[in-house]
């Protein structure tokens, strides 16, 4: 588990036996969000990542657009592997969520995908941009080590929730629309996970 101060934990959310922590460690007073760091329970340890609304709101980390790109790619993989109404619905909502965000002044670095070390039915289990990476669970049930689709959607949902109360007032409506679609995608993923575990 990563070592963080309890005073820095601004929130915790749960996903089928796993957690996602949001931390205010190193957040600067002029930043629009109250947290920057995220720690996702990977089933064996915690994986830390930095998250920001866009490339102008913090010096480093995954942007909302990049995370949406990764979530859409993972749902597409899930839909390819085992198509269901839930995965299709999640994909549709993630497309709408991405469309709701206006283009930032500065473009995000491109996200790439690659296979991990563990065997997997997915074509890729690692997402990357620059020096950052996200290791995904190689199985769809979340039994192996790695971040799950549900955890990624929880991170996006929390990011959009925080964005609706941030200082970037001109974009609040866009964030609300994006959050509504991310929340619907998360609900679809929860349904899929519940059906898988039965």
Image (tube, rainbow, N blue to C red):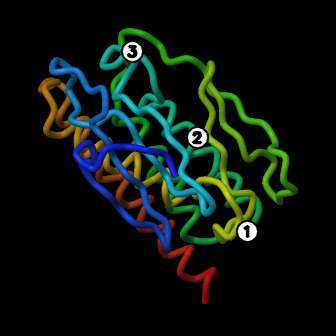
- Report the disc number at residue 155: none
Q: Are marks 2 and 3 in contact (CB under 8 Å)?
A: no
Residue at (42% x, 55% y) in the render: 20
Residue at (44% x, 58% y) in the render: 185
Q: Are marks 3 and 1 in contact (CB under 8 Å)?
A: no
Residue at (68% x, 59% y) in the render: 145
- Report the disc number at residue 59: 3
Q: Earlier in the sequence, mark 2 or mark 3?
A: 3
Instruction: Name the quadrant of the C terminus.
Output: bottom right
Residue assigned mark 2? 70
Provide residue 158's location: percent of width, then percent of height: 31, 49
- CA neighbours of label 3 inside 10 A, class few (<14), some (14 to 19), many (20+): few
**Element type at marker 3?**
loop
- Given residues 43 and 161, the one toward you in this image is 43
| Pair 1/2: label in front | 2
Is residue 102 found left or right of 148 in the rendered image?
A: left
- Given residues 185 and 144, the one toward you in this image is 144
């Amino acid at each position: 588990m990563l070592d963080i101060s309890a005073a820095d934990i601004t929130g915790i959310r749960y996903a089928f036996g796993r957690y996602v922590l949001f931390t205010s460690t190193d957040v600067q007073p002029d930043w629009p969000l109250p947290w920057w760091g995220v720690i996702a329970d990977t089933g064996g340890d915690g994986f830390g990542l930095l998250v920001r609304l866009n490339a102008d709101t913090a010096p480093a980390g995954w942007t909302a657009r990049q995370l949406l790109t990764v979530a859409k790619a993972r749902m597409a993989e899930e839909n390819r592997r085992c198509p269901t109404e839930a995965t299709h619905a999640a994909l549709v909502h993630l497309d709408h969520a991405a469309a709701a965000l206006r283009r930032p002044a500065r473009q995000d670095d491109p996200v790439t995908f690659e296979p991990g070390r563990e065997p997997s039915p997915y074509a890729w289990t690692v997402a990357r941009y620059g020096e950052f990476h996200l290791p995904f669970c190689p199985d769809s049930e979340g039994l192996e080590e790695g971040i799950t689709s549900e955890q990624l959607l929880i991170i996006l949902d929390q990011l959009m929730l925080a964005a609706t109360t941030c200082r970037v007032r001109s974009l609040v409506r866009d964030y609300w629309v994006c959050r509504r679609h991310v929340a619907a995608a998360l609900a679809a993923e929860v349904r899929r996970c519940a059906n898988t575990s039965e």
